Amino acid sequence: MLKREKFAIFVEVTGPDGNVHGDIRTVRMAKQIKIKEIAARAGVSPGTVDRVLHNRGNVSAASREAVERVLAEVKYRFNIHASAISLRKEYNIVAAIPTAVTGEYWGSIRKGIERAVEEYSDIRLNCTFAYYNQFDIYSCRSSFDEIAAQNPDAVILGATFVSEARRLCELLEARRIPYVFVDSRIEQTRPIASFATEQSACGHLCAKLLDAIAPPGSAFAIFNSKRIGNENAYNMLAREEGFRDFFAGAPERVTKSEFSVLDPEEGEREVLRFLAENPRVRGIAVMNSRGHIIADILRRHGIQGVRLISFDTTANNIKCINEGSMWAVLCQYPEMQGFQAMQSIIGWLLYKRTEPAAHRDMPIGIVVRENLPYHREFLLQEAELLP
Amino acid sequence: MLKREKFAIFVEVTGPDGNVHGDIRTVRMAKQIKIKEIAARAGVSPGTVDRVLHNRGNVSAASREAVERVLAEVKYRFNIHASAISLRKEYNIVAAIPTAVTGEYWGSIRKGIERAVEEYSDIRLNCTFAYYNQFDIYSCRSSFDEIAAQNPDAVILGATFVSEARRLCELLEARRIPYVFVDSRIEQTRPIASFATEQSACGHLCAKLLDAIAPPGSAFAIFNSKRIGNENAYNMLAREEGFRDFFAGAPERVTKSEFSVLDPEEGEREVLRFLAENPRVRGIAVMNSRGHIIADILRRHGIQGVRLISFDTTANNIKCINEGSMWAVLCQYPEMQGFQAMQSIIGWLLYKRTEPAAHRDMPIGIVVRENLPYHREFLLQEAELLP
DNA sequence: CGCAATTTTGTGTACGAACACAGTAATATC
DNA sequence: GATATTACTGTGTTCGTACACAAAATTGCG
């Protein structure tokens, strides 16, 4: 049996077994209502509707009410295209983030931001990156002060120093400049959005994986790079907490150690000494992106049977994953964070989207050698970084 | 030292250690050239430029050349918004996919498609879903025939029967109707795009994980649900191949078994019998989304120490992950596939994007209990732009 | 009540691309 | 050489929103 309408297709197929196998559903778009139509229904002019929609004032209570009543009935949505074409303003946006090196974590965030600018090239966006030294609170403060002094239309904030971030946010709020966070969320601030990974969940996942891939009853080590300067180690601590939480029933299985990054030879000695003293350790977690350093040490010394998990799909870590010296990295999708941060600003500034999903927990990706090649486009990484 | 321009920020901060820590880069958008400007430069009218741009003919060789010369110089990109607003055509799109149940694989693909329709609600899209029974080639053929008989503006194809898909593609090509594949790529067809996972890589990854989390020297089983009807098991076979490839050096470690789905009690007996006969099996791979059935059997019989990995984040599988009866699922991001499929059609029809990345390998996600809450099937950028 | 000041409202134009249509130039036909 | 035919080109209107500006209505105040 077969029916046809103007377009909807009806396929009802009776197969040899007597059952009906086909089914058709058309999702026809409800026709969007236009401002003109709303004006007509409310008995006012389009100009008045526009004033109500954009809260531009100079509307009598009676008119406003009439418009709002119609608005409530029809649930109006802006036409993005017409809106964007009319709004021909130029937007200056500042991204204040730690120095972004291509192939490393903040480099990926930057790339996501840049991609969004490119993607929305029909909107005049000027994006200024104000980099600071993430290990130096002094450089962070100077950078942030300067941003507040300018008058950007919006700010993207990659904040490693909580106190400095709070200070800047207060200034921005006083000036009604919207801002979003990438890579963190900071209490007592009011961003229009924030994008970050739940760090303790990352640590928990890391523990679960190491436990699963190591022989039963193994011991595990958390290896952290020694602090450089007054580095804010908030993320690392949260991850460690999650990691230990997984082993809450047997805390003696988790040891912690540090290794020097500034002095690689000393770092190597520290790692080797630790492993010699703790032969039951079968898994190592590095709570930041420096896992590749440990991986290299393990590889060069032919140390087998100790599995390593680190964070972030940086160029160095990817290399280790590929050569097998690292078992997995947990991925925070930095590029996606950057992209979505810029998107949410565009949504706010242009499309007046003011009821934002305030915070978004990013997914936590598990990247091992076998699914690494397929992460490429997903992560929007540079091709040359990957095999 | 501190300089200011109209907007660019210069922060050069000399820290206490004498090093410069701040750095500023502004990415200023090159101003887009308009059709009017091109017309002026080429000494013709905007209408003529438009005719050249859209190959609408009726342009003298001299004019065409003049316009093309300017075009080559300035690399014009037309304004998406103005374009979309002018093109006020209504598009009829058909998605021919297997019956899509919410919470299952094809249901997620459908959801991605629907989300794209919603996302691009400023474009008049009517999407018709033509479902067929993926286990019945007869229903597939009828459904496909009917599609070809209509004249949709584009087609999304979820093809489980290769021969039928080829036949439909030929018809569509003859009518110059663009089409995209989701969940598969089929040789000897010319889709404008295709989205699918590399199935053998999935199988390989599955093997790697099972091997890693099971005791050394364990044996593994591939459990597949018995075929229903003339089900196309192409994906399952490819996964199995990848799985066995991982154990190429020790093929005796991999056993294969089947279990009945239509008769659950019989299926259960088969599974239990197999496990009793193969006590060294410490890991089970189910090469489709039916892993939850095995998980339930293991759970109900209190069978410990056998780890299970299945495919697809279906509602059933997610439940098992949460209660711990399944160790992981590999995820193909079906929602993303559907979304991007529709996106590529919109890009083709509206934005004249004709140089497509013909095929896109989807990422292969690893979902375990610890990252499940943060796992979003729908990781696609634009999703967040609209409510 | 009258006139100015202010608030409210409607109209018109711009945005940039697309395309219909009218208008002009070039060629064909008798 | 006049007219019909075709080939080409420019103008003008459209899409839906935003906002400037003018027009109308309301208010204030002597």
Image: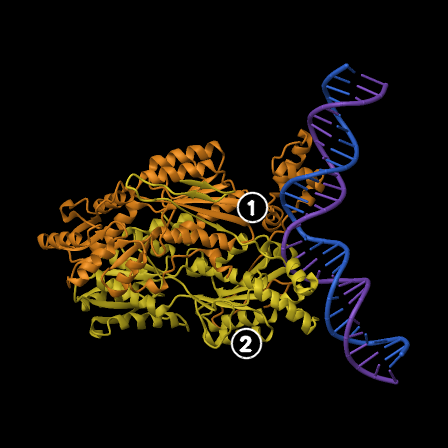
Chain colours: A yellow, B orange, C blue, D purple
- Between marks 1 and 2 in the image, the one whose residue lies nearer the viewer: 1
Which of the 4 image quadrants contains residue A12?
top left
Percent position (x, y) of residue A335? 44, 57
Residue B387 lies, with reference to residue B129, above or below; the image says below
Give the residue displayed 55% in from the left and 42% down from the top: B352
Q: Amino acid at mark 1?
A: Glu
Say left or right for A178 vs B339: right
Image quadrant in which the N terminus of chain B is located: bottom right
What crowding class fits label 2: few (fewer than 14 Cα within 10 Å), some (14-19), or many (20 or more)? some
Percent position (x, y) of residue A174? 59, 76
Q: Helix, strand, or loop for circle 1?
A: strand
Which of the 4 image quadrants contains residue A352?
bottom right
Q: Which residue is mark 1?
A: B90
Name of the residue lying farthest toward the left: B277
What crowding class fits label 1: few (fewer than 14 Cα within 10 Å), some (14-19), or many (20 or more)? few
**Subunit that carries the residue with mark 1:** B
Percent position (x, y) of residue B380? 44, 55
Percent position (x, y) of residue A89? 65, 59
Q: Amino acid at mark 2?
A: Glu
Q: Which residue is mark 2?
A: A170
Which of the 4 image quadrants contains residue A354?
bottom right
**Marks 1 and 2, how far apart at CA:** 48 Å
Q: Is residue A89 at all visible to an observer of this figure?
A: no
Residue D9 lies, with reference to residue B333, above or below; the image says above
Residue B247 lies, with reference to residue B320, above or below; the image says above
Co-location on one chain, circles 1 and 2: no
Give the residue displayed 28% in from the left and 56% down from the top: B329
**Subunit that carries the residue with mark 2:** A
Q: Helix, strand, or loop for circle 2?
A: helix
